[in-house]
């Protein structure tokens, strides 16, 4: 069955990423919880905490099924009640302000043979924007997309710019990446096996991207002022996830596991009233880069 192939591949991606993150950090091992969902299915929540590099992070796998709530049916514009959804969701909050936050999600949703799709994406939220790091990250994503369709990267990059936008702040959450949803043969020209391969390729892009960024920045010394800025940027991350993130909303509306859904929130964040970075500071330079439409690749 197609969904069984998806589940097996996503579990393997979770295993590989957890192993790679432990090796890159050098200290932290994940804590695992196996959970079941009332209504059908379950997952594996794996949490990293208090490592050399990873202050808090999660690499979660889930495969759930059951009846869709009415609110979700209206949002998806479907009539059927039964659904199946599988995915891997990752958020990593590093302790060093010069190592970026990273998020990845790959998912497969199915209601019947005709109503199903792939979605997902990967994006970067640096506390301090280093152009060479962002170019590297986007080039890797572009190369991954180009293996399947040269139109994917520019299209999915724009969607990420639009999606990861904090409207009440009028700034992007970070420097973007790629974001896509409802990929089907009808709207891509790829068959289901090719779409599956693309989803797996996005998942497999995580480790080479993030371990390289860790190695580039892990040993940079930082000041208390750098950390205060990090806490402020984390607060913006939390605002986005709680106000706009569709995965958070879907998890809550389908009676998902709260600890797994909210593992994306940072361990420490601060909200400073009316904070303005000093003119010509590294913080001001980063703030100026939190806009849509930059050609990073």
Image (cartoon, grey):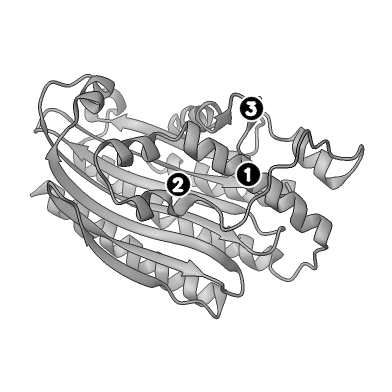
How far across and how far down the image is residue 106, in percent? 35, 46
Name the residue at 36% across, 35% down: 249
**Looking at the image, do the residues carrying marks 3 and 1 touch, with CB atoms under 8 Å apart?**
no
> 156 above or below 31?
above
Is 271 on the left-hand or right-hand side of 107? Answer: right
**Label disc, if present, on residue 189 of the rendered structure:** none
Identify residue for label 2.
144
Q: Does label 2 or label 1 sit earlier along the sequence? A: 2
Q: Position of residue 22 (x, y in %)?
A: 48, 74
Which mark, residue 235?
A: 1
Relative depth, front residue between 12 and 67:
67
Residue at position x 66%, y 27% in the image? 169
Separation of residues labelled 3 and 2 (CA atoms):
22 Å
Residue ranking furthest to the front: 273
Question: Quarter-wise, where is residue 275 in the image?
Answer: top right
- Mark 2–mark 1 Cα distance, whole angstroms, equals 31 Å
Report helix, strand or loop for mark 3: loop
Q: Secondary structure at mark 2?
A: helix
């Amino acid at each position: 069955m197609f969904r069984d192939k998806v589940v097996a591949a996503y579990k393997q991606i979770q295993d590989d990423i957890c192993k790679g993150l432990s090796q890159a950090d050098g200290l932290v091992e994940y804590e695992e919880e196996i959970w079941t969902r009332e209504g059908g299915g379950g997952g594996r929540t794996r949490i990293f905490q208090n490592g050399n590099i990873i202050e808090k992070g999660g690499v979660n796998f889930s495969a759930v099924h059951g009846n869709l709530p009415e609110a979700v049916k209206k949002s998806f514009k479907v009539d059927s009640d039964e659904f199946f959804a599988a995915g891997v969701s990752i958020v990593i909050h590093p302790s060093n302000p010069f190592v970026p936050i990273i998020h990845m999600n790959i998912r497969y949703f199915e209601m019947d043979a005709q109503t199903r799709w792939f979605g997902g994406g990967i994006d970067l939220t640096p506390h301090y924007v280093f152009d060479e790091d962002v170019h590297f990250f986007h080039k890797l994503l572009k190369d991954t997309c180009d293996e399947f369709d040269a139109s994917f990267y520019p299209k999915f990059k724009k969607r990420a710019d639009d999606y990861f936008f904090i409207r009440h702040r009028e700034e992007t959450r970070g420097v973007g990446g790629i974001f896509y949803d409802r990929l089907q043969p009808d709207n891509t020209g790829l068959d289901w096996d090719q779409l599956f391969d693309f989803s797996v390729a996005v998942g497999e892009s995580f480790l080479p991207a993030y371990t390289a960024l860790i190695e580039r920045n892990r040993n940079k010394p930082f000041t208390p002022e750098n950390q205060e800025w990090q806490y402020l940027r984390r607060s913006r991350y939390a605002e986005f996830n709680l106000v706009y993130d569709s995965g958070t909303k879907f998890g809550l509306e389908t009676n998902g596991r709260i600890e797994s859904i909210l593992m994306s929130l940072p361990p420490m964040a601060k909200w400073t009233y009316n904070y303005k970075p000093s003119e010509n500071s590294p913080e001001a330079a980063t703030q100026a880069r939190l806009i849509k439409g930059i050609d990073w690749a």
